Amino acid sequence: MPENPATSDDAVLEVRDLAKSYPVRQGLVLKRTTGHVQAVDGVSLALRRGRTLGLVGESGSGKSTLARVLVGIEKPTRGQVLVDGEDVSTMSRGARRELRRNVQMVFQDPYTSLNPRMSVGEIVAEPYRIHPDAVPRTGRRKAVAELLALVGLDPDHVHRYPHQFSGGQRQRIGIARALAVKPRVLVCDEPVSALDVSVQGQVINLLEDLQDELGLSYLFIAHDLAVVQHIADEVAVMYLGRVVEEGDRPAVYKCAHHPYTRALLSAVPVPDPAARSAGTELLLEGDPPSPADPPSGCRFHTRCWLARRLAAEQGLAGDGPDDVPERCRTEDPVLVPLGRGDGARGAAVPHAAACHFAHRAAAFDGRPAAVVPEDAGPDVGPDIEPDIEPDAGLDAGLDADFDPEATLDPATGRAVLRPTRPDHVTETVPDPAVLESRER
Ligand SMILES: Nc1ncnc2c1ncn2[C@@H]1O[C@H](COP(=O)(O)OP(=O)(O)OP(=O)(O)O)[C@@H](O)[C@H]1O
Ligand code: SF4
Ligand SMILES: [Mg+2]
């Protein structure tokens, strides 16, 4: 079982050695099980109270599967889910439902996750059917109006239907629905991926405002490290069902230890030319292998740029998928704390990576990390990680006065704060006359 550096007494939501597999069936009539897709395989993570854990990885790495298990939509094949330190599987049904109320989900696609035949009011009030005790029946109308206002929508639009709203507004409706039963944790599965870049920043800012106001904890899933960079306190990187690196956000972004994380960071556009030219770009070649048949040893070895460079150093050809150090092909690396990230000032989570040669990564690609703002401190080598003041440097400029016209910039990948109050909402809304005629 992999080690669990992230386990925390302060955890509101935690998974231990969690696995979820799906049977692979073949045959037209008599379907036979011919194997299993290991969508999540031995993940241990802790989400701390009032914090945001960013979960990042390519398509198919198991992020949504983990999310579905966390909110109770699916049962794990192995391992534990703990809410407030209590194992959900050992509870009575009633206690489990009450605990589940505290963990709600915001879905990726606001176009398909809202029932088109239900009004906004019905959608937001829907969770009360499962959790009737959350708000007394007589107070629900008022609660829905308050929720709509809270997410920056006009409470008078309660009778409108999803198609009468823009994508960003629909995601606000999805957030209001998730908040209806007063949860303490939101599992946000790529909540901005389906939105135009022009509104991504607004939704991220709304989530941040709500976190401050309501003391929420977020598991924020994204495949884009640029998005997580601005909202996460801690980051976990998944590859083929496993967490391969985790740590406090500044530590991971400043000195990623795992070659996969470094490749993902390398793909994040950097506006600063000096930082951009600080290292070589690390291409992730090909698609991830199938989780039904993961590679032996280290699962990343078929695509690992570091293993290939190490092989070349050892005199191997260094260009075939299995042309890597023997250890990479045969020994499955576990997640272990590395470097001085463990002792970084204020570091809440030990910085850990699952790579036999993590200490060599920075030496080979020549860059401390791809996303290094000018004021983030001195460059660092593989074993010398600087003391990092959480939130210092990386957010510089974000918390200052901001340009209300700016958003998530596709060129730089950097989110820019935008006002989220209703009077500042700039999303396009259909013509009111058209809306009125639809309502009739
Ligand atoms: N119900 C299912 N039955 C069979 N396989 C599944 C099922 N759900 C997910 N998988 C497989 O599990 C793996 C992980 O899928 P998952 O959707 O969790 O990945 P993801 O990281 O969320 O990807 P994406 O970024 O595309 O959303 C994939 O190979 C997927 O095909
Ligand atoms: S263990 Fe080997 S293959 Fe795996 S990430 Fe490290 S260097 Fe690459
Ligand atoms: Mg997904």
Image: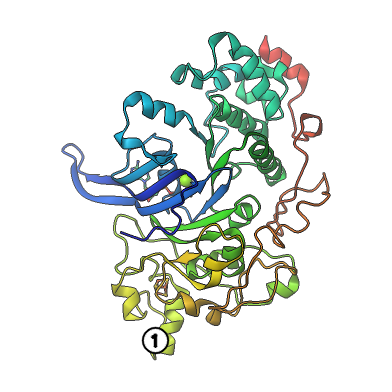
Q: Closer to the camera, 18 or 21?
A: 18
Picture layout, residue 172 above or below residue 70? above
Which residue in the rendered view is the most extreme toward the bottom? Answer: 315
Residue under the point 70% across and 61% down: 392
Which amino acid type is marked by label 1? Ala
User: In which quadrant of the rendered image does the C terminus lie?
Assistant: top right
Colour style of the rendered protein structure = rainbow
Residue 267 in view (yes/no): no
At a point 72% along the width and 66% down the height, the residue shown is 373
Seen from the viewer's position, the closer of residues 294 and 183 is: 183
Q: Residue furthest front?
A: 9
Occupied quadrant, residue 389:
bottom right
**Front residue of this view, candidates 90 and 167:** 90
- The residue that mark 1 highlights is 317
On the image, the x and y values in percent for residue 439 come to: 67, 12
Q: Is residue 124 left or right of residue 273?
A: left
> Residue 239 at what x, y percent from top left?
43, 59
Percent across and percent down for residue 401 are: 84, 49
Q: How many discs appear?
A: 1
The image shows residue 49, relative to residue 132, as above or below, that is below
State the image coordinates of residue 253 (x, y, percent, origin top left).
Answer: 60, 64
